């Protein structure tokens, strides 16, 4: 007998529907700030989805994932500064550069595991941060304002907030779908197997390093796309996008939402940012709640919110 | 179906339109730094702004005033986020504040795009005075090069032949050092820009300055960094060896911490506590009364002026701030009593004003700033030609 | 020439400060296999305590001593309440849990002391210069930092190499289960080691406070460097942490001093001013990346004390 009511599926369906219909609500109520907030949530959710691919499924604890946000963002920013405003040039460049960096960083870092992997990915992210801070021509630490969003063919106009929102939403759904297909494929099995027991996978005959590297590059490229979107959204890039604490924020989203689940990062991003917005309205000291909450999630709710939903779904009687 | 919904919604909004346009109050957003070591500056600005509101009965043009203070945490990206929120979520009529040039530059686009009126109470990046000037952007402070230019002139007067420049590596720091170099007639024997705001250890730069053996060292380090610099300058044994000339490094927020280290170190400023006009006397006296144990700094004075400037414009348009052209004209008139005496704008909405030499003297157990001389009158910034507004 | 010597001394001073931080980190990591991101928070707490106690007692030294004690207590409390539950778990759990601790500490400090930060002024007898050799004055305070840090390093060496507790610490770093199986009170040992690490971090924090600052989040930036030092030196090795810290201190300081001039020969003045500090910061990470790729266990691995 199938359960009459699957809490998890319903919750996710409601969330997705709400996200799709949000611009309708904001259009009617005039609360444009909500649209801005949720666009940001969608973009960071995309970054979290990319991180989930390597962190949740692949077990690769990268503490330098925010670097790709910056790389993608700066690709758009630098090109815009130099007069190249066509999205058809900017975005492929952002993706290509992110992929290249991910390849190099991955090739060097994936030889290590555990805390060493964390440290080396962190090191590379900090290096990216310092490179950006050192570029006087592109603002350095002061950052760079982007005066024109990426231009595509009419009628697509990214300066239109609603259109931009739907572009981000579409790309996010595409990314979630991509990750879902990847992780349910043979490729995904190898990567997940490598997370549990790399030695065994290699003994079976899989060149796990290659698989993990490809996975790493895909994740980096997706995050670079998020970076390009973020640059368009805030119309400003700065090295701070890449600082290691930002990578920490992404990890929190993934863990809070639920690792190794397709919608987990989205749930995590929504939860964290809405929480932040709501709580900061109540008290300035909201992080004092977030801190221990994180600890509790780590200790007791390893599957994150998605995990809790799964648990709850199983308990609902048929 | 959705089209019908949209149409209905649009109709509702239009119906609600005129009613919403009636101004119930004047909303002002104030972005400054209220956390970290620079919070003392932000607090001084907030205190002064509040004092100005008290003095005008918390009403502008007959309408009650609501101020929303936001913390930029000293970071450009946070300042920009807060600016976005003030414009998009709070729908403010005016924005003021901004200590730091880099925060201001990062936040500028949303302000200009939304045609919100901005009255800058401190930051003075040269771009705003030049090519990025805008009809809705005004300043009650200065342009970054004006104050150090005055100091350069003073150094010439004192017969300084060579100088070593030290400052932070961000928009304002570069402007300041360039400003000194533009009027100083002697030789610049060295220049060091330090990482900002993270680098507070100036041992390397001081060592280099010592090695270059200049007649004087010019330094620009606002806020807490100024305290650190003076302390390390003394620790390096330079206090009696190489004289120090400053801009924005010694002010009423840093003096309580710098104490005797600041004695005999000259600075230049467009406002000092003891300027002898009526508005200033009232401002300083009431500030000390309302906030015992504190004296206002130039940051505060500029914020006080900002509040009064806005009030004068609101009064001139009789509260109808949606008429942007009228508000702009009223702001340009600058018809208010500034605490620095006479006040007028250049074509780029940056003040044309006098600069004074400030000296630190001991008054009982306290250290206070005194006006020692007028260095230059009616000084205008170097960038007004680049501004397309006439 | 004196400029170079002065920069070297500055580099040494910075390196020693890093060593104090890294020593605690590497001990905790080596013995308890715990990645503690909140180590920087203990550094911050030490500085805040010192500023507060110094203001109460009107004595810099007394304030410092009290702060050390207070940080030790806070460290041990954190170990008992939080860290105990994280032992044996995945490193990711450590990272997340202690990241949460950072947020908690930052906000708690903000609640208690306010957002503005404090200052810790130096007493006049430290606020002068000493003549290292005739004609060469150096900041007395920085010199005292070097002296105190070296003394602590020596003390640490003696404790770790020549005492029973030190032997247990070294044994625990090599093989934790065995030490427990031999009947040693592991729980107490862990608490003490963590407390020691906290005290060292607090000492570093309070010593740099008069030069730099006492503000919320001050631990985050230096924490990364401490981790880099730990990894380069080898996790669990105090000797490694010492060597790596001095190395990193020199590279950072000398880089910041001489790279701008070097870069000015290649780039414009303005570009050099931005590029140089970036490059010198990058050098350290580059070094760590090279070490990790070539010799992942670090220059000295655990056991080589």
Image: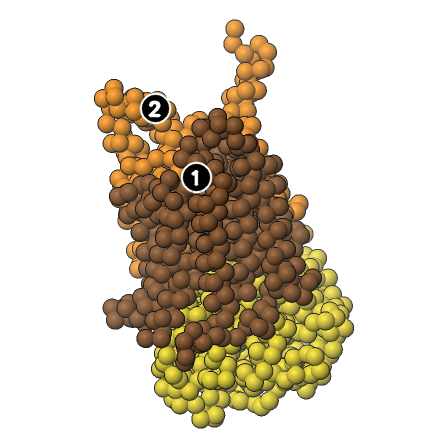
Chain colours: A orange, B yellow, C brown
Q: Is residue B363 above or below residue A279?
A: below
Tell me, for residue B58, which label it has, or none.
Answer: none
User: What chain is tagged by disc 2?
Assistant: A
Asked if badge 1 and badge 2 are on a common chain, one would say: no
Dot 1: what SS?
A: helix
Q: Give coordinates of residue C44: x percent, y percent.
A: 55, 53
Tell me how far mark 1 sits from mark 2, CA to CA: 30 Å
Which residue is label 2 attached to?
A: A197
Question: Please, is residue B236 above or below residue A58 in the view?
Answer: below
The N terminus of chain C lies in quadrant: bottom left
Query: Residue B136: x percent and y percent?
Result: 53, 67
Q: Is residue C228 above or below residue B211?
A: above
Q: Which secondary structure lies at badge 2?
A: loop
Name which quarter of the figure residue A29 lies in.
Answer: top right
Q: Residue at x 57, y 36 (%)?
A: C188
Residue located at (54% from left, 15% from top): A314
Residue A106 shows in this picture: yes
In this view, the mark in front (1 or 2): 1
User: In the image, is residue B341 above or below residue C105?
Assistant: below
Q: Position of residue A241 (x, y in %)?
A: 43, 50
User: Is residue B271 left or right of C277 when viewed as pictured?
Assistant: right
Which of B329/A39 is in front?
Answer: A39
Q: Which of B345 and C39 lies nearest the eye of the viewer?
A: C39
Residue to which mark 1 is pinned: C170
């Amino acid at each position: 007998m199938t359960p009459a009511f699957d809490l998890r599926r319903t919750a996710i369906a409601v969330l997705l529907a709400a996200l799709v219909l949000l611009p309708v609500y904001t259009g009617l109520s005039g609360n444009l700030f909500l649209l801005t907030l949720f666009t940001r949530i969608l973009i960071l959710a995309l970054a979290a989805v990319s991180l989930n691919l390597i962190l949740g499924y692949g077990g690769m604890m990268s503490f330098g994932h925010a670097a790709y946000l910056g790389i993608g963002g700066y690709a758009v920013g630098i090109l815009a500064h130099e007069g190249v405003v066509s999205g058809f040039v900017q975005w492929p460049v952002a993706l290509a550069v992110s992929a290249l960096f991910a390849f190099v960083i991955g090739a060097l870092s994936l030889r290590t595991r555990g805390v060493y992997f964390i440290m080396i990915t962190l090191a590379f992210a900090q290096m990216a941060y310092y490179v950006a801070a050192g570029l006087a021509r592109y603002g350095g630490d002061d950052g760079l304002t982007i005066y024109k969003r990426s231009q595509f063919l009419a009628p697509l106009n990214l300066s239109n907030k609603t259109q931009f929102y739907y572009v981000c939403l579409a790309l996010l759904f595409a990314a979630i779908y991509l990750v879902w297909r990847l992780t349910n494929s043979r490729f995904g099995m190898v990567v997940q197997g490598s997370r549990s027991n790399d030695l065994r996978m290699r003994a079976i005959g899989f060149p796990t390093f290659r698989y993990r590297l490809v996975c790493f590059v895909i994740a980096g490229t997706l995050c670079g796309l998020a970076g390009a979107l973020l640059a368009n959204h805030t119309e400003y890039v700065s090295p701070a996008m890449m600082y290691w604490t930002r990578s920490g924020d992404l990890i929190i989203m993934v863990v809070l939402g639920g690792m190794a689940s397709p919608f987990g990062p989205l749930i995590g991003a929504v939860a964290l940012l809405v929480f932040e917005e709501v709580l900061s309205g109540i008290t300035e000291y909201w992080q004092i709640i977030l801190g221990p909450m994180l600890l509790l999630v780590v200790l007791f709710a390893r599957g994150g919110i998605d995990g809790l939903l799964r648990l709850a779904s199983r308990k609902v009687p048929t | 179906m959705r089209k019908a919904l949209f149409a209905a919604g649009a109709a509702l909004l239009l119906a609600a339109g005129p009613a919403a346009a009636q101004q119930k109050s004047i909303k002002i957003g104030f972005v400054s730094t209220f956390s970290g070591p620079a919070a003392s500056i932000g607090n001084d600005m907030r205190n002064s702004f509040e004092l100005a509101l008290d003095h005008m009965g918390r009403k502008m043009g007959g309408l009650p005033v609501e101020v929303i203070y936001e913390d930029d945490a000293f970071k450009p990206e946070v300042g920009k986020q807060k600016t976005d929120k003030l414009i998009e979520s709070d729908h403010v009529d005016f924005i003021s504040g901004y200590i730091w040039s880099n925060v201001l530059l990062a936040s500028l686009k949303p302000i200009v795009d939304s045609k919100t009126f901005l009255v800058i109470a401190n930051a003075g990046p040269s771009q705003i005075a030049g090519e990025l000037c805008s009809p809705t952007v005004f300043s009650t402070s200065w342009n970054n090069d004006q104050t150090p230019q005055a100091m350069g002139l003073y150094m010439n007067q004192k017969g300084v032949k060579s100088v070593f420049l030290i400052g932070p590596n961000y928009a304002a720091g570069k402007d300041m050092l360039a400003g000194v170099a533009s009027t100083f007639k002697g030789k610049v024997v060295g220049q060091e820009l330090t990482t900002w705001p993270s680098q507070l250890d100036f041992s390397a730069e001081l060592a280099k300055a010592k090695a270059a053996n200049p007649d004087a060292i010019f330094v620009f380090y606002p806020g807490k960094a100024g305290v650190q610099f003076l302390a390390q300058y003394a620790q390096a044994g330079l206090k009696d060896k190489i004289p120090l000339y400053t801009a924005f490094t010694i002010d009423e927020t840093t003096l309580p911490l710098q104490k005797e280290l600041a004695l005999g170190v000259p600075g230049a400023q467009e406002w000092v506590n003891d300027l002898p006009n009526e508005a200033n006397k009232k401002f300083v006296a009431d500030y000390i009364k309302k906030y015992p144990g504190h004296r206002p700094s130039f940051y505060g004075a500029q914020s006080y002026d900002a509040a009064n400037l806005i009030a004068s414009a609101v009064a001139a348009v009789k509260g109808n701030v949606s008429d942007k052209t009228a508000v702009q004209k009223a702001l340009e008139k600058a018809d208010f009593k500034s605490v620095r005496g006479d006040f007028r704008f250049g074509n780029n909405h940056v003040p044309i004003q006098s600069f004074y030499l400030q000296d630190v003297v001991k008054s009982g157990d306290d250290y206070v700033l005194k006006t020692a001389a007028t260095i230059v009158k009616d000084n205008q910034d170097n960038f007004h030609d680049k501004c397309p507004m006439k | 020439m004196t400029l170079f010597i002065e920069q070297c001394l500055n580099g040494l001073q910075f390196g020693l400060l890093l060593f104090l931080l890294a020593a605690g980190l590497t001990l905790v990591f080596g013995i308890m296999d715990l990645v503690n991101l909140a180590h920087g928070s203990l550094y911050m707490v030490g500085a805040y305590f010192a500023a507060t106690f110094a203001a109460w007692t009107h004595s810099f030294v007394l304030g410092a001593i009290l702060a050390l004690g207070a940080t030790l207590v806070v460290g041990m409390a954190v170990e008992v309440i939080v860290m105990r539950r994280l032992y044996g778990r995945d490193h990711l759990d450590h990272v997340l849990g202690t990241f949460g601790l950072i947020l908690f500490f930052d906000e708690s400090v903000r609640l208690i002391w306010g957002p503005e930060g404090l200052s810790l002024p130096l007493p006049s007898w430290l606020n002068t210069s000493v003549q290292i050799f005739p004609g060469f004055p150096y900041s007395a305070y920085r010199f005292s930092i070097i002296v105190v840090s070296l003394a602590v390093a020596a003390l640490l060496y003696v404790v770790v190499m020549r005492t029973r507790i030190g032997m247990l610490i070294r044994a625990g770093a090599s093989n934790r289960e065995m030490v427990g199986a031999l009947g040693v009170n592991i729980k107490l040992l862990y608490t003490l080691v963590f407390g020691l690490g906290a005290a060292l971090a607090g000492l570093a924090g309070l010593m740099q406070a008069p030069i730099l600052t006492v503000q919320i989040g001050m631990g985050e930036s230096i924490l990364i460097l401490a981790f880099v030092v730990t990894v380069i030196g080898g996790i669990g090795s105090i000797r490694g942490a010492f060597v790596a810290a001095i190395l990193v201190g020199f590279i950072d300081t000398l880089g910041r001093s001489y790279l701008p001039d070097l870069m000015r020969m290649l780039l414009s003045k303005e570009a050099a001013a931005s590029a140089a500090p970036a490059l010198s910061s990058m050098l350290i990470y580059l070094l760590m990346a090279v070490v990790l790729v070539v010799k992942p266990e670090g220059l000295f691995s655990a056991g080589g004390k």
